[in-house]
Image (spheres, grey):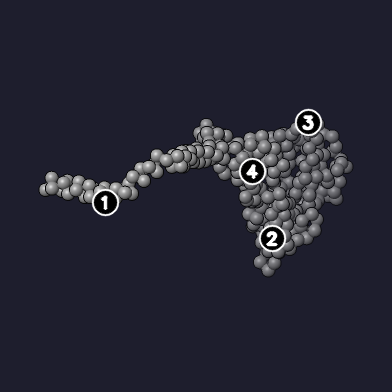
Amino acid sequence: MLKFLSIGVIIVIVLLIVLSRKSIKPFFRFLFSRVFIINLILALLVLFFIPYYTLKYLDSYTNHGVKLPVPNFVGTSVNGINQLATEYKVEVVINDSVFSDEFPRGTVIRQDPLPNSESYPSYVKPQRKIYVTIVKQSGEYKEIPDLTGDFRVSKKIAKVRLEMLGFNPQFTAKPSQDDYVLELRYNGKVVKKGDKVLKGEVIEVVHGNGGGGVPITLPNVVNKTVSEASQILSLAGLNTAVDFVGEDLSAEDSLNYYVTIQNPHPRNLQQGLIETGATIYLIAGKSATVVDTTGKGK
């Protein structure tokens, strides 16, 4: 079968050659003509040079084989970003800004891609973009909660609610039968529900002392440590304000310093009595030597 098929193919080819013998001769003559050879050479050159220079251009455009370690921008201020970017030959784009209490304003806190390190190799091409997130330079404002309205709250609840909003509450006691919040103050001015104050600011909480302003005998805390004096006065329903004499005080020093001046002093008060909720001003030093026992200091 295959033998007859092969013979048939050969016969067909021979017939085609015989029938087209007049057109084949000019075709072969054209293949060896000058025009065809020149065009063939030009076509081969085009086919070679176009891919070659295209690949060369792509290598140059993409910086093939060139890579830079990603610098660490976290902790850098906004003013220092451009200088660091120029030094490392990259471009920095600020794509987000957030509020944060842990970092200074205008500081980079995140970046993409992550910086290069031994545990995390990270590289980019020169002049590529690094996207960073910074802390907003303007602070965040929070609304003052309702602490003095129809549902009055204690100073403990006020402390929790204010701290949850990011405020720094400080307390001032006034004679009262309970310890409810009487008013809130910011920079000496009364603030109310809905007023907006910068997050992190000090809010003064004026509250009752729970003692109703009952007169008590003022303890004498001169020559006692600040820790002991504060505890004694607190148990008596009194507030304290301490000034320390000295430099470079540690937290431990501030508790172990001795009270040298107390104002008011019991001997300067009639029968040594004072109302609960009052503030006692103390001056503390390293030595237990009594500087002033008359209470005529601060």
Q: Amino acid at mark 1?
A: Leu
Q: Position of residue 34 (x, y in %)?
A: 45, 39
Distance between the alpha carbons at the discs numbered 1 and 4 = 75 Å
Left-right relation of 229 to 114: right
Q: Earlier in the sequence, mark 1 or mark 4?
A: 1
Give the labeled residue for mark 3.
287
Q: Amino acid at mark 3?
A: Ser
Q: Given this view, does label 1 or label 4 mark the residue nearer the observer?
A: 1
Give the labeled residue for mark 1.
19
Outermost residue, right side: 296
Query: In which quarter of the view is residue 83 placed?
Result: top right
Left-right relation of 256 to 267: left
**Quick check: 89 above or below 210?**
above
Q: Position of residue 38 (x, y in %)?
A: 47, 39
Distance between the alpha carbons at the discs numbered 1 and 3 = 129 Å
Give the labeled residue for mark 2.
143
Give whichever of 53, 61 is nearer the camera. 53
Give the labeled residue for mark 4.
92
Q: What secondary structure is found at the residue carrying circle 4?
A: strand
Seen at 29% across and 48% down, the residue is 21
Query: In which quarter of the view is residue 129 placed?
Result: top right
Distance between the alpha carbons at the discs numbered 4 and 2 = 35 Å
